[in-house]
Image: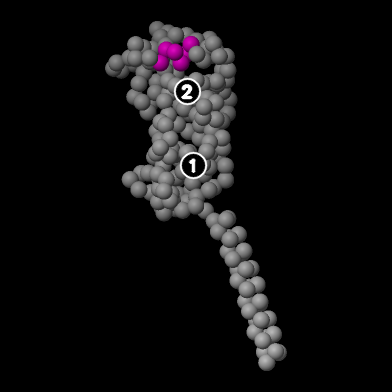
Amino acid sequence: MKRKTNIVIAISCGIIIILVNYIMISGKKEKGQLEKFIILNENLVHEDKVYVRQVDDLVAVDLEKQWGITDLNQQIFKIRGQETAEWLCIKDDGQEIVFKEVSVPGFVLTQLEPNVLKIKMDERLVGDQITISNTKTIKAVMSQLTDDNLIDGYVKVSEIKTVFIFSEMYPGLSYTLYYAHSEEGTCYLMDDSGNKVWKIGHELMEYLM
């Protein structure tokens, strides 16, 4: 009888060890799995959080490793420098789209307090560019983005350059504006997503000459 009891105890212990090992292995697999998201009315839904799509001119500067995947098989990445609970980025057919958690305050261009501007001939963030970090110049440019300087109607320009705006408020993000000037020498900044055009001074022109 004692021998049978020992056998039962040994079998029970063996089962417990197997279960413990299974739980540990399962836990490791789950930890490495991608988070599951659902696309609902162009928004991202993850557990109790809803992420809202942002305008195309708000771009992620640097992506970390893939963190999740949607029900449409789109890759979701963390944005380096931003809280994952607040900001995410989807890669869809080569396009990167930024999403913001719905309770996070909205992105306001005129409240950015930029510390760097980068000017390029094209719309890519990589490659040759002119970097402006002069605080006085940046403040002078941003201070002109007011209603008083808005232009109504069509503006004829001779050349357009891309301006990437960086701020320590959003270290992982950049906002895109377009810098242009007319044949007469008038300078403009254009917000494509906001559908706005401001007439500005020649502060940026000095860096392009």
Q: Can residue 174 be seen in this view?
A: yes
Spot occupied by residue 169 in the image (x, y as percentages of width and height): 52, 27
Number of on-image labels? 2
| Residue most extreme to the left | 153
Disc 1 secondary structure class: loop
Q: Which of 96 and 47 is in front in this view?
A: 47
Image: magenta residue range? 140-145
Question: What's the CA distance linking mark 2 and mark 1?
Answer: 21 Å
Residue 30's place in the image compared with 175, above or below, is below
* Residue 160 in the image, given as x and y percentages of width and height: 44, 20
Q: Name the residue under label 2.
A: 112
Name of the residue lying farthest toward the top: 184
111 relative to 187, above or below: below
Q: Nearer the viewer, mark 2 or mark 1?
A: 1
Q: Does the magenta stretch include residue 144?
A: yes
Q: Which residue is drawn at 62% across and 68% down?
A: 20
Q: Residue at x 50, y 24 (%)?
A: 165
Q: Which one is nearer the viewer's eye here, 201 or 109?
A: 109
Residue 181 among magenta residues: no
Q: Residue 85 carries which label?
A: 1
Q: Is residue 35 left or right of residue 106?
A: right
> Which amino acid type is shown beneath numbered disc 1?
Ala
Q: Where is residue 155 in the image (x, y as percent from the top left)?
A: 34, 16
Res. 190 image quadrant: top left
Residue 124 seen by the camera:
no
| Between discs 2 and 1, the one toward the N terminus | 1
Q: On screen, 181 above or below 33? A: above
Quadrant showing the C terminus:
top right
The residue drawn where x is 60% and y is 68% is 22
Dot 2: what SS? loop
